Amino acid sequence: MREMKKIFAGILMTVLLTGCSSQGILSEVPQTIVLPEEQIDSLPMQEEDPTSAETENTESFSLLEEGGSRFAYESLEAPEQIWYLEIEQALGEMEGTVKLSTDPLEQGLDEQDIDKIFQCVMIDHPEIFYATGYTYTKYSRGEKTVGIDFAGSYELTEEEAIVRAEQIRKITADWIRGIGEDKSEYEKVKAVYEQIIFATDYDLNAPDNQNICSVFLEGASVCQGYAKATQYLLNHLGVMCTLVQGTVDTGEAHAWNLVRVDGDYYYVDTTWGDASYRMEDGSEQEGLSEINYDYLCVTTEDILRTHRIEGVVAMPECTAMEANYYVREGNYFTEYNREQLQRIFDAAREMGRTDITLKCADETCYREICRVLIDEQEIFSYIPDSNSTISYAQNGKQLSLTFWVTNE
């Protein structure tokens, strides 16, 4: 048997982008209490209930967009949903101070619940890219809270936010037309995954990297920008998609997505799909950067190999495999199958692809395929050109293998 040729003197290892620092990802929701707790009871009370005061009639506008998923809203209890809708409107219209309804107070909510509800609004609305946090004032009569004023914190003026929103809508309308609204839900998710990866560079120093401006206007972002852009596009394509927050196995904060395809839930991590490959000595290789499909429509079991879910919204158990990338593309193996492998390599060659990726159902299958293809060098039996050079990457956590074939 021929000796396996490698471009590099070692197995190529996939370098996955681990995400944001905790400070970076949480900067979306800073909390600023205007009045210290010890001063609240000494405030002069207003003659009328603060929630009943009327605001001036001014011409209103809203940057909220139709058709988005309200996954986080639906996770809240009825009293929380009342404040959600009021905070949602306030942020969408970039209002100043608004008085939250008192009914939720009577039903047991207090100022400690504002942060969770604010985060839920931000989770559901990637188009609220201009809000950086909030402030509130609590009004008390004795030990009883009788009213709460809420105000969003914004890094842009109304005029600046409107200009950026129009730019984003124009750019994403072109992206959506290119993807095609007549595709299946799986095809839409795959197309958005690929489009964002091709159009975006991972850059910790990218401006606006916690929101969609970084992806659509700058072409550079970090995990939360990738995830919110994925959510924004898929919602506009009619696919349910929400933001998921947590950490990765290095302990860093991270953001990704939950999608629903043909009625089943899956996880999607566009950031980790934007992969690079390095030699074992750490040097990065040109020409081998490809999309990593290990995080396109995966189960809870798969995502928890490397991620930890820690957000304010509970996530469903994802068990379906029908829309998993490898299953859909015919690259999913339950055992070593020569005929299936030959079809995959033949199809790649016909399409002019130089990369082939496959995923195994379990450790036993993975070890067997690695042994046959790599250790015993059976990989060359699928390559007709005797002058071919093969390089490869192994992802043991996701049980996947990627091969690159080049002809000398």
Image: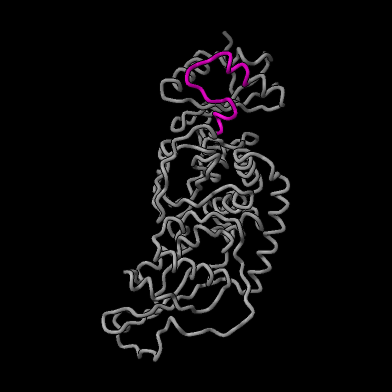
Where is residue 387 drawn, in percent x and y? 68, 16
Question: What is the image's colouring?
Answer: one colour
Residue 364 lies left or right of residue 142; in this view the side is: right
Label total for image: 0
| The N terminus, quarter of image | top right
Give the vertical position of 331 relative to 126 (above or below): above
Quadrant hosting residue 60: bottom right
Give the vertical position of 111 relative to 306 (above or below): below
Question: Is residue 8 visible in the rendered structure shown here?
Answer: no
Where is residue 251 drawn, in percent x and y? 39, 48
Give the residues in magenta: 325-344
Instruction: Please say whether residue 39 is one of the residues in the magenta stretch.
Output: no
Q: Residue furthest top?
A: 1
Give the vertical position of 70 relative to 326 (above or below): below
Residue at position x 35%, y 91% in the image:
44
| The C terminus, quarter of image | top right
Residue at position x 42%, y 50% in the image:
246
Where is residue 370 drawn, in percent x and y? 48, 20
Residue 42 lies left or right of residue 391; in this view the side is: left
* Residue 55 vs residue 14, the one in the foreground: 55
Q: Residue furthest left?
A: 143
Residue at position x 35%, y 73% in the image:
105
Question: Is residue 317 visible in the rendered structure shown here?
Answer: yes
Residue at position x 48%, y 18% in the image:
335
Where is residue 379 drawn, in percent x and y? 57, 16
Give the vertical position of 116 relative to 251 (above or below): below
